[in-house]
Image (tube, rainbow, N blue to C red):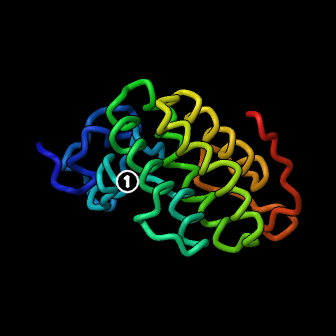
Amino acid sequence: MSYDGKCGSCANFVDDHGNPFNPRWSYPAKGYCEWYKTYYYPDDSCGPHYRPRGYVTTMVCSRLGLGKENEVYKTIIGFQKNTMEKDPKYEATLREYDVIGPQISKCLETESIGVINMIYSNFLVPVATLIKEKEEESAVYRYKGLLDLLKAHYKISSKTSDFKQTATKGKMKVLSVKKNI
């Protein structure tokens, strides 16, 4: 069966025993997505795995009123799409990002503009610079550092789509940033 935009036709969609999806399953049985590590109905759609990423970059640039023509945005999103998604060594990183990225972005929706500016200036701009300088591993390392910081602050687990915000109601009180990461 070829992929038709629905989870049931995806090669990563299996039953609880790891067997490929059988279209004769009785509905409304859910199958397990080995890519996103969660359960879906066969007629759900995920996009499939080439769906746009850049959740955090998009949210930060959007909150700052920067369009998709912004050079930092284009550089980071282009790197994710044209390099990371095509290189198997980044597969685990991208899988984790597909779980935590939307959660972090949701938290950033209500974050103070000061923190958003700090993320842009101290993380996204340097990441884009590293990409342009062909320091790709350093760029990935720095971006992962940002994600780890935000994951810890918002108490987000990469193993589940459930998360808790801190007692500060999702606001970051203080972020200390090491300039020479």
Q: Where 151 sits versus 169, above or below?
A: above
Is 169 placed left or right of 48 in the picture?
A: right
**Number of marks in the rendered image:** 1
Where in the figure is residue 62, as x and y percent of width and height? 54, 71
**Looking at the image, which residue is at 36% across and 38% down?**
85
Q: Residue furthest top?
A: 89
Q: Nearer the viewer, residue 10 or 17?
A: 10
**Looking at the image, which residue is at 29% across and 50% down?**
48
Q: Quadrant of the N terminus?
A: top left
Q: Nearer the viewer, residue 173 or 79?
A: 79
**Looking at the image, which residue is at 21% across and 43% down?**
22
Is 128 placed left or right of 173 in the picture?
A: left
Rendering quarter of residue 106: bottom right
**Looking at the image, which residue is at 86% across and 49% down?**
176
What residue is pinned by disc 1? 30
Q: Residue furthest left?
A: 1
Where in the figure is residue 174, as x and y percent of width and height? 88, 58
Q: Nearer the viewer, residue 161 or 85?
A: 85
Q: Where 59 sits versus 157, above or below?
A: below
Q: Residue furthest front?
A: 133
Where in the figure is residue 82, as x and y percent of width and height? 33, 40
Is 62 placed left or right of 90 in the picture?
A: right
Rendering quarter of residue 103: bottom right
* Element assignment for label 1: loop
- Amino acid beneath label 1: Lys
Q: Nearer the viewer, residue 62 or 37?
A: 62
Q: Quadrant of the C terminus?
A: top right
Where in the figure is residue 115, as x and y percent of width and height? 76, 63
Is 130 placed left or right of 53 in the picture?
A: right
